[in-house]
Image: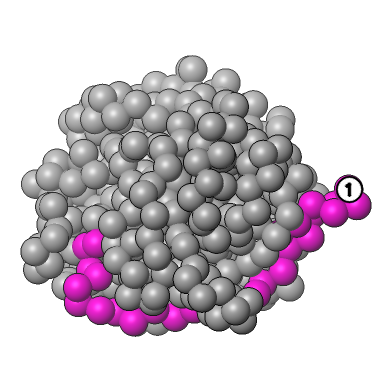
Amino acid sequence: MKQRILAATLALAAASSPALAEDSVFVGHLVDYTGPTSFVSKFYGPGVRDAVDYINSTGGIDGTKIEMETIDYAYKVPQAIANYKKWKSKGMIALQGWGTGDTEALISFVAKDQVPVWSASYSGHLTDPTGKNPKTKKPAPYNFFYGPSYTDACRALVQWAAGDAKEKGLSNPKFVHTGDNHPYPNAPKEGCAEYATELGLEVLPPVVVPLGPGDFKAQCLTIKESGANYAYVGNLGGSVISLLKSCNTVGADVTYMGNVWAGDYLTIQAAEAKDYVFPTATPFWDAAADGMALVYKIADDSGFSKDAKPTHHYIRGVCSAYYMKEAMEWAKANGGLTGENIKKGMYVNQNWTPKGLEGVCLPSSWSPEDHRGSTVVSINKGSFEDGAVNIERIAEMTLPRRDDWVGY
């Protein structure tokens, strides 16, 4: 896997304009292999890339190849916007995006240009295509993502926490949000806090934790002294590892609940975490799901063995690419491969899993009024014990599709 990532990173330096095949469509692909979110992008990005390569090797979009250019923009919003403009001038009809800051910055661009985007940002702000919710900042008619939004995943975590607190006999459970003052950790802050209050949790002032690694003992002492019982972890990678280690040092006895990018076996191992709670939207790498056969085939054909064991973020990348593929197939058969038709293709099926990925990608539904693909959240608990990572699923939550939660 390390060789695969290194090869992908080196290849970015030599990336140039693709020579379009006679029957092909162009798709841009943003990744962060060298910036602050590379800890997870180095798995998700190859998942998208490898899936598109496999799609092309098995016939493409009913004979049409996907020409994809992958750019490491290092999580810099201006660079993402510059690459978008360059790709648009090349005739890009779809985008596989990455971060929250850049995805939200591009909402108006992609809507005007009719370029559907499948991002690795699961910001709830991307789920209102019409702007029907007064709290929606901008309607996002061309934005899609696979899995529950950051806010819905956080809502599921506080729903679990409310039940856990009741089992433990906590009379006044307290909840605190942690994370950088940045669009990604901030995306669920307000909506999740409102739901935590609805459920009877006392919401404490948020604690700002930088997105990069560091010594976070001061933040951990703040969490400890606040009396928090449950802490939402809004960052990822090195920052989460540093936070969990620092809080262990100061004895902050809190149940930490990570966002969807903050939980995987590498994070748990590096932090030597205990009883760390986090959500998922796919099985793990060694799961006995029917659709894992296709995931393993995609990985094997890419040049590395499934024994390398990527994190499950790779699998979400595969799901994202395959929802795009099937929307493109519908578009080609119903008026042609245009951005507008591809968007329409996302609305055709309900409770939809891409062919071959049964048991891997959650059945999902998008509509012209609601871009929340799924509100089902699996909740897991992971610990590093006796030199090994142990992860168990402890709950599955299905959140209601409340109108006041769309776009929020």
**Residue 284 magenta:** no
Q: Residue furthest right?
A: 386
Residue 289, picture quadrant: bottom right
Query: In the rendered image, which quarter is residue 29 located in?
Result: top left
User: Image check: 2 left or right of 181?
Assistant: right
Where residue 284 appears, as percent x and y from the top left, is 67, 62
Using the image, determine if residue 137 lies above or below residue 8.
below
Position of residue 355 in the picture relative to residue 334 (left or right): right
Q: Quadrant of the N terminus?
A: top right
Q: In this picture, which residue range is highlighted in magenta?
A: 382-408
Q: Residues within 10 Å of mark 1 (few under 14, many from 20)?
A: few
Position of 38 relative to 365 (above/below): above
Q: Residue at x 26, y 25 (%)?
A: 78
Most extreme residue toward the top is 13
Q: In front here: 279 or 81?
A: 279
Residue closer to the observer: 77 or 236: 236
Amino acid tagged 1: Gly
Decide whether residue 386 is among the magenta residues.
yes
Residue at image position (47%, 71%) is 172
- Residue 112 screen position, x and y as percent: 9, 46
Q: Which residue is pictured at 12% across the width and 67% down the height?
A: 133
Q: Which residue is identified by label 1?
A: 387
- The quadrant in which the C terminus is found is bottom left
Judge by depth and name the residue closer to the eye, 217 or 267: 217
Examine the rendered structure and indicate whether residue 221 appears above or below residue 344.
Answer: above
